[in-house]
Structures are given as C-alpha cells and as structure tokens.
C-alpha cells in the first residue's frame, strides 16, 4: 500500500529531477545563447532549489525508516548527489564562473537519474538494518566516505576539463593560462580536502570491521579498491607537493582517479561481491 510518505517521496524525487534537468539545460544553453547570461543570477537560484529538494528527500527517508539514510545504494547515491550539489554552489560562488555549472550539473543529474530510474525498486526501498549495520559507525564511516568521494570526483572532473582544454587549445594564441591555472588550482584544493576524508573513512571502516567481525582488514573487494583509490590520490598529492607536478601531469593522475573511484563505488557494489555489495548482478 502506498502511504502518504511514499507520495511525498515521489513528489520530492520528481522535483529533484526537474530542477536538476532545468539547471543542466540552462548552463549548457549559455554556451550557445549568450543572452541567457543576463538571467544567470535568476537561474542559479535553482541550485538552491535542487539542494533543498535533495536535503528534504534524505530527511524524509530518515524519518520514514527511523535510521540514518545511508543503508543502501540508492540512499548513498542521493547523498552523493547532495554532496556534489553543495560543492557546486560553493565553487560557483567562489569562482563566479558558469563553467563550473556546465561541468557539474550533468554529473549530478546523471547520479540522480541513475538512482531513480536505473536501480530496481528493491534497491531503492528502505528496509530494516541488518545487525551489522545497527551501529553508530554507519553514520561516521559511510558519511565520511561519501563526502570524500564527492570532493574527489569534483576535483577529478575539474582536472579532466583542464586536461581536455589544455590538449585541444595548444594552437590557440589567446592567453588562457589564467583560466587553466584557476581550474588546476581548484582541482588540487578540492582533492586536498577529499583525501584526508578518504583516509579517515578507511580507518573508521577498519575499526568498525574489527568491532563487527574481529578483523581490521579482510581484503574484501571494496576494501581493496578503496586502498587502490587511496594510493592513486596519495601519488597525486605526493607528486604535486614534492615533485612539483602541476598542470597536465597531475591532471592525468586525477583523470585516472576518476575511473578508479567509480569502480570502487559502483562497480564492486553492483557486481555483488563481498561485504559491501548490493548484488545487482549476483
């Protein structure tokens, strides 16, 4: 039976999708229709609508289930979309550059669309937590990991943009160095925040695993890929700080990191292998 909360959740989910889709269309239309820049301030307010809608959806899930809304893949994807949306608003306010919206609005829309339309209903439905998840470590570990993924993904997307533009504008005589430097530096700063959170998330997961299963590390596929992700971004920061790798060199490592994150976050989970899996294909 469909309850009042279910209707409300459907309504908010639709609001999220419509606002995110409208946002993406506007930002991409700016490229072809410069007159829309005059309405940039008005349409940028949709970012707040999207953030409020995503926040409301998470709060409603929390209220309906009685536990923190990070117990399944659907909820973690919505929280990831919320994280990137918040970063989107913050970075756009800092840079005052609509390119941030062109890059991040499709990413958020893709995550929201995948969560609502690609995942089967049984993976979207909130259910009672299994005993191993009935712990305060759930809030700490999963929240920190998703926040780190959001920061790292945004940093990687900025690096991919930098790398793509740098490679395709080699023969252009216009002085684009200030723009390149801005996005390279922004990518570095974002990843620099995400990496410590990733480290803390892995450590908190190890402590939680020891309390639950009596072992800090079991070489679960998700644990292994989380470690691979950690090494990729450790190499990024090490080469950036101690070998002065900037520009295309560091952006290339971040581009690799973008793929590794998605394998760690989605690939391992959906294949249905290990303790962290949701078993879509199992």
Image (cartoon, grey):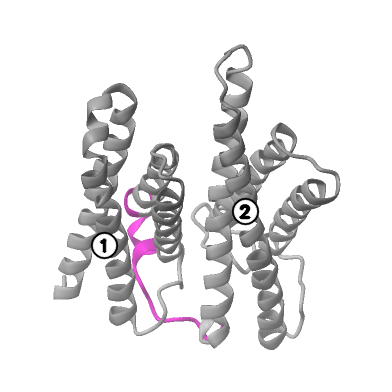
Q: Position of residue 98 (x, y in %)?
A: 38, 39
Q: Determine which residue is flagged by label 1.
A: 53
Q: Nearer the viewer, residue 51 or 133?
A: 51
Residue at 57% across / 40% down in the picture? 182
- Which residue of the protein is positioned furthest toward the right in this rendering? 243
Q: Position of residue 254 (x, y in %)?
A: 67, 43
- Magenta segment, which residues? 116-132
**Can residue 128 be found in the magenta stretch?**
yes
Residue 135 picture quarter: bottom right
Look at the numbered discs 2 and 1 and tell me whether their residues touch, using CB distance below 8 Å.
Answer: no
Mark 1 secondary-structure assignment: helix
Q: Nearer the viewer, residue 210 or 128?
A: 210
Q: Which mark is residue 14?
A: none
Q: Position of residue 130 (x, y in %)?
A: 49, 81
Q: Which quadrant of the rendered structure holds the N terminus?
A: bottom left
**Where 37 falls versus 258 (above or below)?**
above
Could you tell whether 24 is left or right of 238 in the image?
left
Residue 59 picture quarter: bottom left
Residue at 45% across / 52% down in the picture? 94
Residue at 85% across / 50% down in the picture? 242
Could you tell whether 279 is left or right of 21 in the image?
right
Could you tell whether 104 is left or right of 31 in the image?
right
**Comparing marks 2 and 1, which lies closer to the viewer?**
2
Q: Which quadrant of the rendered structure holds the C terminus?
A: bottom right
Q: Position of residue 229 (x, y in %)?
A: 70, 54
Q: Pointer 2: residues within 10 angstroms few (<14), some, or many (20+)?
A: some
Alpha-carbon span between mark 2 and mark 1 = 28 Å
Q: Determine which residue is flagged by label 2.
A: 189
Q: Nearer the viewer, residue 279 or 218?
A: 218
């Amino acid at each position: 039976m469909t309850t009042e909360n279910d209707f409300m959740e459907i309504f908010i989910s639709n609001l999220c999708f419509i606002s995110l889709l409208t946002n993406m269309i506007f930002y991409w239309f700016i490229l072809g229709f410069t007159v829309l820049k005059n309405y940039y301030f008005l349409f940028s307010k949709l970012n707040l609508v999207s953030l409020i809608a995503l926040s409301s959806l998470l709060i409603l899930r929390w209220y309906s289930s009685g536990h923190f809304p990070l117990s399944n893949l659907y909820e973690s994807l919505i929280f990831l979309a919320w994280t990137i949306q918040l970063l989107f608003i913050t970075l756009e306010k800092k840079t005052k550059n609509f390119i941030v919206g062109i890059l991040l609005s499709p990413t958020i829309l893709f995550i929201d669309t995948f969560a609502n339309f690609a995942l089967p209903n049984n993976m979207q439905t909130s259910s009672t937590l299994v005993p191993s998840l009935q712990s305060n470590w759930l809030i700490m570990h999963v929240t920190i990991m998703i926040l780190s993924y959001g920061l790292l993904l945004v940093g990687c997307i900025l690096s991919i943009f930098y790398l793509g533009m740098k490679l395709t504008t080699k023969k252009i005589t216009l002085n684009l160095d200030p723009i390149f430097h801005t996005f390279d530096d922004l990518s570095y700063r974002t990843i620099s925040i995400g990496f410590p959170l990733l480290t803390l998330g892995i450590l908190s997961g190890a402590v939680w695993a020891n309390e639950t299963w009596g072992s800090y590390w079991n070489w679960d596929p998700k644990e292994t890929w989380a470690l691979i992700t950690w090494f990729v971004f450790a190499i990024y920061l090490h080469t950036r700080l101690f070998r002065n790798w900037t520009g295309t060199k560091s952006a290339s490592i971040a581009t690799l990191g973008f793929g590794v994150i998605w394998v760690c976050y989605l690939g391992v989970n959906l294949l249905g292998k290990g303790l962290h899996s949701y078993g879509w294909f199992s």
